[in-house]
Image: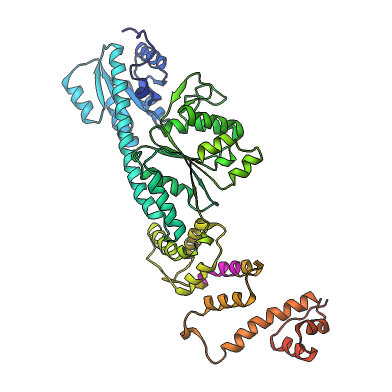
Amino acid sequence: MTLPSSPIPKNTEVIMSLTRILVADDEESMRWVLSKALKRKGFTVDLANDGRQALALIQENSYDLAILDIKMPGMTGLDLLERIREMKSDLLVVIMTAEASMKNAVEAMKRGAYDYITKPFDLDVIDAIVEKVARARQIAGQVSLLKQELKEHYQVEKNIIGNSAAMQSIYKTIGKVADSDITILIQGESGTGKEMVARAVHFNSGRLGKPFVAINCAAIPRDLLESELFGSEKGAYTGATERKQGKFEQANQGTIFLDEIGDMPLDLQAKILRVLQEHEVTRVGGAHSIPVDVRVVAATNQELQERVRQKEFREDLYYRLNVVPITLAPLRERLDDVPVLVHYFLDRICTELSIPPKQISEDALTLLGSHTWPGNVRELENTIKRAVILSNDPMLTAIDFESLQQTTVDTEICSQDTSLEAIVDKKLRSCFTGIEKLDKSDIHSKVLQQVERPLIRFILEKTKWNQVKAADILGINRNTLRKKIHELDIELKRG
């Protein structure tokens, strides 16, 4: 047995989809030869001299391929194979044996071996086996990816919800640009659903079935972001113990979603621009460019034009990304979509949490429709989830959104465009949605009390509890004020 003269496999792209291989054999010479041959091809190779040591390594590490001798002390290769099938069914195993018997071959395949080779063998056989295994893993990965993509495609079609004019415009744009490879820039506040739109573009394009890879540029530390995007070679930096594919390589033939690209450092912006222009990446510590076929969809919650003016974002990259801009309106500008979103989240959350279906009352819908939703659709989803979890009733009412009621009133009071009359009107409508809920004998006095009490208390506080000044501001005499304080049970404090 001789080592091959060339360290480069015939099909480098396919074979390099494998990274780590385990070789288990009680013969030191066999371990040495296989280790040398595989390491020369760029693989990480771990060695075991018996079945028990191999089992321990498999339990502790992740391997793409295991090459096992059939006869080893402590645990045979066939027994180890059975244990592997129980623990890590996706690990492909090749069995080696010096006894070319039909019994061994049949038994190995029955127990789940991927292939079977007889000693002695030429290392070209190992080359062929490795490429065959790599292709099998690649195909299995593509099938798994396709299943996941189709599942997500179905979910995305349901998750982009809204009948408003703003959302109808988004749907039209997605339909127009999905099939092309045009670069897209999605802009909108946090929580408006930028990633959902990016996924919709991908799942409605010719790249369906290929990877959709998302990365949040603001969530990864600066010193790690470059290797995350472009990959790294073994030894490129401290802790780089093996070659690593970057997000662009992982997204090859598919779509990469660069979320919060406005937070990307300027030096990395230059490298992104190069990828868009040259369609190739260079790993950190690498000397060669790697071609990539990737559609780029970027997103930001910032005003990129303003960042360009402030020299914090490259102008050339901005224009390269902004070929087709999509701007998502905040939820407060499309409140007509709130009811359909509420019903969608209510159904989905109950299903996900295995909770019996819940309904929502008109008073609750009115309240939700009057909120400004600073956190947009994400805030609405979390609000519904919290109410579903905390409520024991099959019907959610305005009471289940008490914290939201206070937030809504506070927000409206701070708005100069909202009159006090409008605020009271909305509050009354959210509390009393049906005539059957009203106690007709004292509703007038109860409402007046609830308005008067905070008003008088507020004026007294502002005048430092000086009743003469307070009565003057309120436009009533002091005796009337004292009577009101008593009737409304307002606790007086010293100024």
> Residue 276, image x and y in percent?
48, 31
The span picked out in magenta is 399-408
Q: Is residue 412 above or below residue 119?
A: below
Q: Is residue 8 left or right of residue 230?
A: left
Q: Is residue 50 visible?
A: no
Q: Residue 295 versus residue 53: which sits nearer the camera?
A: 295
Instruction: Give the quadrant of the N terminus.
Output: top left
> Residue 129, image x and y in percent?
29, 20
Q: Is residue 406 magenta?
A: yes
Q: Quadrant of residue 421?
A: bottom right
Q: Is residue 169 left or right of residue 372?
A: left
Q: Residue 439 versus residue 125: which sits nearer the camera?
A: 439
Task: Give the color scheme: rainbow, by chain, secondary structure or one colour.
Answer: rainbow
What residue sits 17% from the left and 23% below the top? 103
Q: Residue 74 versus residue 27: which sits nearer the camera?
A: 27
Q: Is residue 77 visible?
A: yes
Which secondary structure class fits the magenta region best? helix
Q: Quadrant of residue 161?
A: bottom left
> Residue 80, image x and y in percent?
31, 28
Instruction: Give the quadrant of the C terminus.
Output: bottom right
Q: Is residue 66 magenta?
A: no
Q: Is residue 312 left or right of residue 131?
A: right
Q: Is residue 455 above or below residue 180?
A: below
Q: Is residue 455 left or right of residue 163?
A: right
